[in-house]
Image: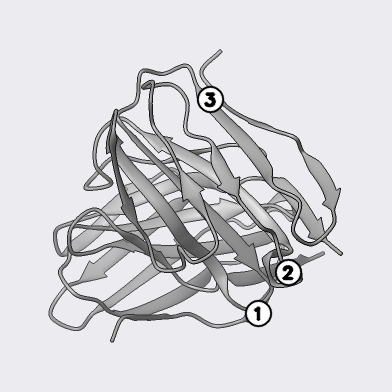
Amino acid sequence: EAQVTQNPRYLITVTGKKLTVTCSQNMNHEYMSWYRQDPGLGLRQIYYSMNVEVTDKGDVPEGYKVSRKEKRNFPLILESPSPNQTSLYFCASSLSSPRGAEAFFGQGTRLTVV
Amino acid sequence: GQNIDQPTEMTATEGAIVQINCTYQTSGFNGLFWYQQHAGEAPTFLSYNVLDGLEEKGRFSSFLSRSKGYSYLLLKELQMKDSASYLCAVSGRGFKTIFGAGTRLFVKA
């Protein structure tokens, strides 16, 4: 089954404790991205990747890092999480760039930083 | 700046037709998407427009006017399961995607 898999689905952590949210897709998609979703603000793009070893900042990259060492995986790293990073996070992938290619979303990771 | 506006909430009756509007101002334009998102779930793709005009797909249609920076999603023969948020998104300059805040649609019997 074609899918985007995120882990974990739920996470509660403390301020400053490094964490990684994993994202994997099995569709051989080139383009992957991370979003956060907050009430009233919609989805905001954090980082995106056009292909292996090619990443770029979205609209809200501060406090996040990503890597794309393999085509299927695109982990999101929070080196020192803070409470303002409490949010619902989605990973998405599409066949090529978002120009005309629909995005497939993972099931989301609800992160709480206390 | 870049901005996408859509109504926060709408209510419609089962069996009726509803139109959800979206206006946008973005740096560059490479197409407009509509996604559906049920509460607690991931967004799912509904439609894509890159040229002016109407795209029809079953009960859902999407319209685009690039000169006006305007799109709408039309839902016909509303069903209770259509109660969800509808997200308008624009592929802009480079490879960024910008989403609106979403429109929560409530379908009542």
Q: CA distance from mark 1 to mark 2?
A: 8 Å
User: Residue at point 82% right, 43% down?
Assistant: A10
**Quadrant showing the N terminus of chain A:** top right
Label 1–label 2 contact, CB within 8 A? yes
**Residue A100 position within the rendered picture, expressed as x and y whole percent measured from the top left:** 24, 44
Left or right, residue B35 beside residue A86: left
Callout 3 amino acid: Ser
**Which residue bears the numbered disc 1?**
B9
- Camera-nearest label, 1 or 3: 3
**Residue A59 position within the rendered picture, expressed as x and y whole percent measured from the top left:** 40, 68
Residue B93, by quadrant, is bottom left
Q: Say few, some or many: other residues with alpha carbon within 10 Å of mark 2 (under 14 / 14 to 19 / 20 or more).
A: some
**Quadrant showing the C terminus of chain A:** bottom right
Residue B83 visible somewhere in the drawing: no
Can you tell which mark lies on residue A52?
A: none
In the image, residue A63 above or below residue B71: above
**Which residue bears the numbered disc 2?**
B106
Q: Chain of mark 3?
A: A
**Which residue bears the numbered disc 3?**
A24
